[in-house]
Amino acid sequence: MEITSRSNNVKHSPKKLRKVANCVRGLNVNKALSSLRHMDEKGAEIILKTLSSAIANAGNTESFDKDMNEVKVKTITVDEGPAQKRFRARAQGRANRIKKRTSHLKIIIG
């Protein structure tokens, strides 16, 4: 049985989130939680919240009766969300475009 949890439009770039997600992918849920708590990255907090949500979803599911020591993080996908477009003033009346990137995060445990 697979349990999913999603976080959409996270205000963090996908490149930075993937760096943290690669460290946690395939680990036991308890090991993943402890390693995320000790990381200094901002993306670790976002992934920790989503993983905790997936664990809570597993607790609410009646057909999911496994011990949490046996449950692993099957997949973590970080996709690109919509980018907010902003402008920064430059010299001589010009402007540069700034893209503030967002992410879609999906975690599957089982």
Image (cartoon, rainbow, N blue to C red):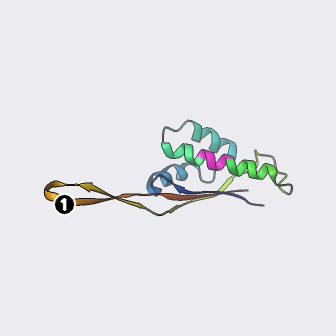
- Verify whether residue 49 appears in magenta: yes
Left or right: where 103 falls relative to 65: left
Vertical relation: 80 (above or below) 62: below
**Secondary structure mainly formed by the magenta segment:** helix
Magenta stretch, residue numbers: 48-52
* Among the 4 quarters of the image, the one containing residue 2: bottom right
Residue 75 shown left or right of residue 21 in the figure: right
> Which percent across, then down, holds residue 72?
70, 52
Direction left: furthest residue? 92
Quadrant location of the N terminus?
bottom right
Query: Residue 52: image x %, image y %?
Result: 67, 46
Extreme-front residue of the structure? 93
- Look at mark 1 in the image and give the residue it sits on: 94
Give the residue type that dot 1 points to.
Arg
Residue 38 in view (yes/no): yes
Residue at 47% x, 64% y is: 82
Q: Quadrant where the C terminus lies?
A: bottom right
- Disc 1 is placed on an element classified as loop
- Quadrant for residue 90, please give it: bottom left
Can residue 28 be spotted in the picture?
Answer: no
Q: What x and y, as percent, mark residue 76?
A: 60, 57
Q: Position of residue 55 (x, y in %)?
A: 72, 48
